[in-house]
């Protein structure tokens, strides 16, 4: 009986956390999920998120590496424009279809907001130019919706396929950055018939990542102080 009471309380706590963050997660068009396998982290794409059930698709580089078992509980991070949300998924199904691997999991632990500065997405509008790799034959224009040390949400009139390698050029804090990157997710913005691209930065070192993380951290702190003063 004690076990049943504990289980019931845990289920209630999970549902309460889901209710608390449900709107935040479901309304984020750029929502992705971080998974870790063999001490390496991958950014997986969310196909569906309904109540406690999540269907996610492995990135191309993880398809022949990641192998979760049915019944296995894995720790994951939902990466949202409003922060990082940590929980666990109980894997219930695996499907391989058209060279893609899909996992279905059920949220089996409370959702906790865990805002690490390297994952915080700062709402910011920047002009971006980019070229498709490896050809670099033509330059395209885009605009950021937000940016983090890990990547950016970029809007463009040109559709770029998921998993495509690109190079992005943008100025941040009076410095020009030229970074290799990967298109993780692409969706149509129905409001203006343009495309939203979730872009992951593929750093070759840590210097530029630390610079961007520091800038975002300082902007976040400045915004927090400004909101704190406005309350009084």
Image (tube, rainbow, N blue to C red):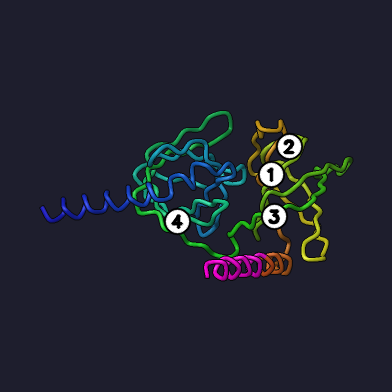
Q: Residue furthest front?
A: 232
N-term-proximal mark, 4 vs 1 = 4
What is the C-alpha distance between the residues marked 2 and 3?
21 Å
* The magenta stretch spans residue 231: yes
What is the C-alpha distance between the residues marked 4 and 2?
29 Å
SS for callout 1? strand
N-term-proximal mark, 3 vs 1 = 3
N-term-proximal mark, 2 vs 3 = 3
Magenta stretch prevailing secondary structure: helix
Circles 1 and 2, Cβ within 8 Å, touching? The answer is yes
Q: Which residue is mark 1?
A: 183
Q: Which residue is mark 3?
A: 124
N-term-proximal mark, 4 vs 2 = 4
Q: Is residue 64 visible?
A: no
Mark 1 neighbour density, 10 Å: few (under 14) some (14–19) many (20 or more)? many
Q: Which residue is mark 4?
A: 86
- Residue 160's disc number: 2
Name the image quarter holding residue 223: bottom right
Name the image quarter holding residue 63: top right
The magenta stretch spans which residues?
A: 216-232
What is the C-alpha distance between the residues marked 1 and 2?
7 Å
């Amino acid at each position: 009986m004690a076990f049943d009471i504990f289980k019931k309380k845990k289920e209630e706590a999970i549902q309460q956390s889901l209710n608390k963050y449900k709107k935040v997660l479901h309304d984020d068009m750029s929502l992705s999920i971080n998974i870790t396998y063999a001490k390496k982290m991958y950014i997986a794409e969310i196909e569906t998120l309904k109540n406690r059930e999540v269907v996610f698709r492995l990135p191309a580089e993880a398809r022949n590496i990641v192998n979760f078992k049915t019944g296995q509980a894995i720790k994951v991070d939902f990466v949202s424009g409003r922060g990082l949300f940590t929980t666990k998924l109980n894997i219930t199904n695996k499907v391989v279809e058209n060279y893609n691997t899909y996992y279905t999991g059920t949220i089996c632990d409370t959702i906790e907001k865990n805002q690490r500065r390297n994952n915080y997405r700062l709402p910011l509008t920047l002009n971006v130019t980019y070229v498709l790799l490896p050809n670099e034959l033509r330059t395209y224009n885009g605009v950021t919706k937000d940016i983090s040390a890990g990547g950016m949400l970029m809007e463009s009139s040109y559709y770029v396929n998921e998993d495509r390698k690109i190079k992005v050029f943008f100025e941040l804090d009076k410095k020009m950055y030229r970074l290799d990157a990967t298109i993780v997710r692409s969706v149509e913005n129905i409001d203006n018939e343009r495309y939203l691209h979730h872009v992951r930065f593929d750093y070759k070192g840590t210097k530029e990542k630390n610079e961007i993380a520091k800038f975002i951290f300082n902007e976040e702190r400045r915004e927090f102080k400004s909101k704190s003063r406005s309350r009084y």
